[in-house]
């Protein structure tokens, strides 16, 4: 075993090897930390990382295993956590000077679930300011002149540069799918309410989702399986059975899946390379894909999303507005200002559209399609670090709370990754991963 | 068996007698219809009642039983339904000319649940305009010069005058507790989300509750037990086990219950008789009751309730506003106008207060008390039919979604009923009925 390349292992492989005593968690964490030392000066993925504390945690995990105590499915596996999830042992600063030095006293539910599964919290990854638009310090691992996307910039970049096999992010608009696509990793935003958000920065109850990053579909499934659950402190979670993500994602679909190619009203924003890449993908899929037009009402979804997001952000960031609006970015200040001026009537009208909109998509799935196929972004990661790019290709699916997955299937001529986004009906999360595996295999064998 | 007084039976007694073949559903319904013929010219409880169709339903129930088919717990029992619940076989007109002649094509979930339990839907009871303030035609059965209370005016009056043993109402502010108190029957508003509201007029998702009317605690329990359930079309319902209301309500409490007497900030609105009656009740309860002050934040609850109710009503009655605001009452028009002018920020701020407010009450219950004891209204039913009275003594509990029960324990010198309201923590519904039974017995034996 070449100990210097353990960081390249998938989480599933590494977990198996730790379980079998082939490697230790300490060796794995050491390899990841070496990778951080090697690359993070350029990538800047981490908001907080204490190497000694990480090693300490890994040694404790190894000790636990050697005593023959039960190991969780992620025993000894390092995970990066976006710096908007509370951690009892590390600062949580929301990417804002207003929360500099903030040290929560307990773990967010998702973090606690990961620890329960045996994971090592390696450190906190860079977020944009309050998980909105103003960029953090992170750069794209494929080209430091380009944005990594946002707002889960550090999580996407850390997984892409193999500093860590798994990371948590979030998505209120396009904050998981877009950076995953720009950095060339898998990004998964499960169904709204599937993963508890207690202890995660709250921007919008209606739109906030936990997001997942990994480099293989198996790892996305493994991570998702640990995180589904009911938490009475997140009123959108539901009691329900555990979902066998790993098992379902590994299955062969009973029939070759059928895809609905949706260009969305923002198709004209895509660049030529994206248009060409999707044309090739559609050709490759042949009779397994059909292009469909969105029903007219869906065209207004971007306005509804903006109304809901800005209204709820304004209410949730009341303290920040009162205490330090002069220390917010101009774009966030403008969002909050708009949010504060919205009427309760407009806000509720927008909220009321979500259910019928999802019902329309549900019909589509029930009639004929296994997944919607659509771009993850308008193109590859744009040059420059002043913006994290355009979330428009994520908005509709976030609004509907549908599961969405960005799969790094395509590449530009300049070797920047291009993400393909797959979207399924609510609660169809595990089947969406199964469909994605089929698609990835189909593309690989062509 | 005196067939002319079957209308006086409780639902539990009547159901048992029907099950045992002692009486038929047709005889019971005939007795109720005779009572309607006798009294409804004065009381005016019904918005729709087709006696022939009621008899037809009763005969079908009797036939079903004679064939030896399984009978539900309410087999053959007539129930009155407030005219804001959809019924597939009767008009549903919301107490507004704007919906005159409206005939829904399917039953509201609660109505379907009652039919499933074997109940006979006797007819539709009078509601105020859109279950808000403008009165319907109903009069108080104890004195036709007095209001029956509202908005569930007809349901309360029909049960009070023994035209029917059970009825459904609703409560968004004080629409079940107040008319129950004014008419001298039991009125029960279970925990928010316990009974599905699909197919019931929607004023406010946050505040709307299904309400229950009966003349005995056993009957309230029997009715509640049929109505608890999950309905995916009501996003506030939760999957969960059936609650054994009848069994728990019949139990003796393990210890004599402890009551917290809460005057609320509106105590000064109560009349002298109410003040005196409560002083006597508190004296009677001795060491089993303590007067407690509300925490200061609770004083704002009436404002939060009004903000939420008016904002949500404005959104939910958009069609009515657009199509016929000139045919709405002045008071409703003013409410909708205020609701349309609220900001999303104020609305969400009010919503955000509910959870911490309920948490404060929860502490109170956990520390020491089984139920809050408080007036159901500021006094007996006021003279006059232009107003249905003041809901202030219900607002706080409705806002918090806590179970509330009006028990007709007291009476004024003029022989009008005075309601005592008991309030429990959310999900403590069945225990609240058990506590109420203890209290009623204590008062009866003194």
Image (cartoon, coloured by chain):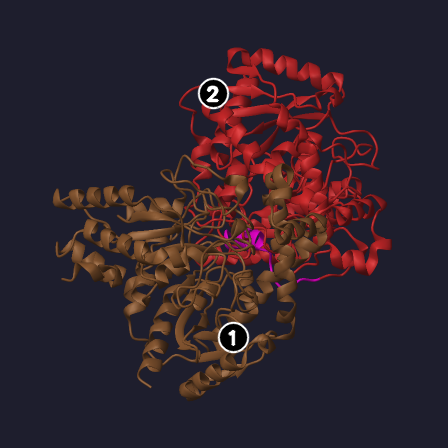
Chain colours: A red, B brown
User: Going 65% across and 13% down the picture, which residue do you hit?
Assistant: A279
User: Going 51% across and 38% down the picture, which residue do you hit?
Assistant: A221
The image shows residue A61 at horizontal and vertical percentages of 53, 55
Location of mark 2 (residue): A368
Neighbourhood count class around disc 2 (C-alpha, 10 Å): few under 14, some 14–19, many 20 upward: few
Same subunit, tags 1 and 2: no
Gap between marks 1 and 2 measured at Cα: 54 Å
**Tag on residue A241?**
none
Decide: is A91 above or below A254. Answer: below
Name the quadrant containing residue A403: top right
Decide: is B216 above or below A312. Answer: below
Whether label 1 touches label 2, CB < 8 Å:
no
Report the chain holding disc 2.
Answer: A
Left or right of A78? Residue A125 is right
The image shows residue A135 at horizontal and vertical percentages of 79, 42
Q: Nearer the viewer, residue B426 or A234?
A: B426
Which quadrant is the C terminus of chain B positioned in?
A: bottom left
**Tag on residue B364?**
1
User: Going 38% across and 66% down the picture, which residue do you hit?
Assistant: B185
The image shows residue B230 at horizontal and vertical percentages of 40, 48
Name the quadrant containing residue A391: top right
Asked whether residue A13 is in view, the answer is: no
- Stretch of the chain drawn in magenta: A103-119
Neighbourhood count class around disc 1 (C-alpha, 10 Å): few under 14, some 14–19, many 20 upward: some
User: Going 32% across and 48% down the picture, which residue do you hit?
Assistant: B122
Report the chain holding disc 1.
Answer: B
Left or right of A204? Residue A341 is right
């Amino acid at each position: 075993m070449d100990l210097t390349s353990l960081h390249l292992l998938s989480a599933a492989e590494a977990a198996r090897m730790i379980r079998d005593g082939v490697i230790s968690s300490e060796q794995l964490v050491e390899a990841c930390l070496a990778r951080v030392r090697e690359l993070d000066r350029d990538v800047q993925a981490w908001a907080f990382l204490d190497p000694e504390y990480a090693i300490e945690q890994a040694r404790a995990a190894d000790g636990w295993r050697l005593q023959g105590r039960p190991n969780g499915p992620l025993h000894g596996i390092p995970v990066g956590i976006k710096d908007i999830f509370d951690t009892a042992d590390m600062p949580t600063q929301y990417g804002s000077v207003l929360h500099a030095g903030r040290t929560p006293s307990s773990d967010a539910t998702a973090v606690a679930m990961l620890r329960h599964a045996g994971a090592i919290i390696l450190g906190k990854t860079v977020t944009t300011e309050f998980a909105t638009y103003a960029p953090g310090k992170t750069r794209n691992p494929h080209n430091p002149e380009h944005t990594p996307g946002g707002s889960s910039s550090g999580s996407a970049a850390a997984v892409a540069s193999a500093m860590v096999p798994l990371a948590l992010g979030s998505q209120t608009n396009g904050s998981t799918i877009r950076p995953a696509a720009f950095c060339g990793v898998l990004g998964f935003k499960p169904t709204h309410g599937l993963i508890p958000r207690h202890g995660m920065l709250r921007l919008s109850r209606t739109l906030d989702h936990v997001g997942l990053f990994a480099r293989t579909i198996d790892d996305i499934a493994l991570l998702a399986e640990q995180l589904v659950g009911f938490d009475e402190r997140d009123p959108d979670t539901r009691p329900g059975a555990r979902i066998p993500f790993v098992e379902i994602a590994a299955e062969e679909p009973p029939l070759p899946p059928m895809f609905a190619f949706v260009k969305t009203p923002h198709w004209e924003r895509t660049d030529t390379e994206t248009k060409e890449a999707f044309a090739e993908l559609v050709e490759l899929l042949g009779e397994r894909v059909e292009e469909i037009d969105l029903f007219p009402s869906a065209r207004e979804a971007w306005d509804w999303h903006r109304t809901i997001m800005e209204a709820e952000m304004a209410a949730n960031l009341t303290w920040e507005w009162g205490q330090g609006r002069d220390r917010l970015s101009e774009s966030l200040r403008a969002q909050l200002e708009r949010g504060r001026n919205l009427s309760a009537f407009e806000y509720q009208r927008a909220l009321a559209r979500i259910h019928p909109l999802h019902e329309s998509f549900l019909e589509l799935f029930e009639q004929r399609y296994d997944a919607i196929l659509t771009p993850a972004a308008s193109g590859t990661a744009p040059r420059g670090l002043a913006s994290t790019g355009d979330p428009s290709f994520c908005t509709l699916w976030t609004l509907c709370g549908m599961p969405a997955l960005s799969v790094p299937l395509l590449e530009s001529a300049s070797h920047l990754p291009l993400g393909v986004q797959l979207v399924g009906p609510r609660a169809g999360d595990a089947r969406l991963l199964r469909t994605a595996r089929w698609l990835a295999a189909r593309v690989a064998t062509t």
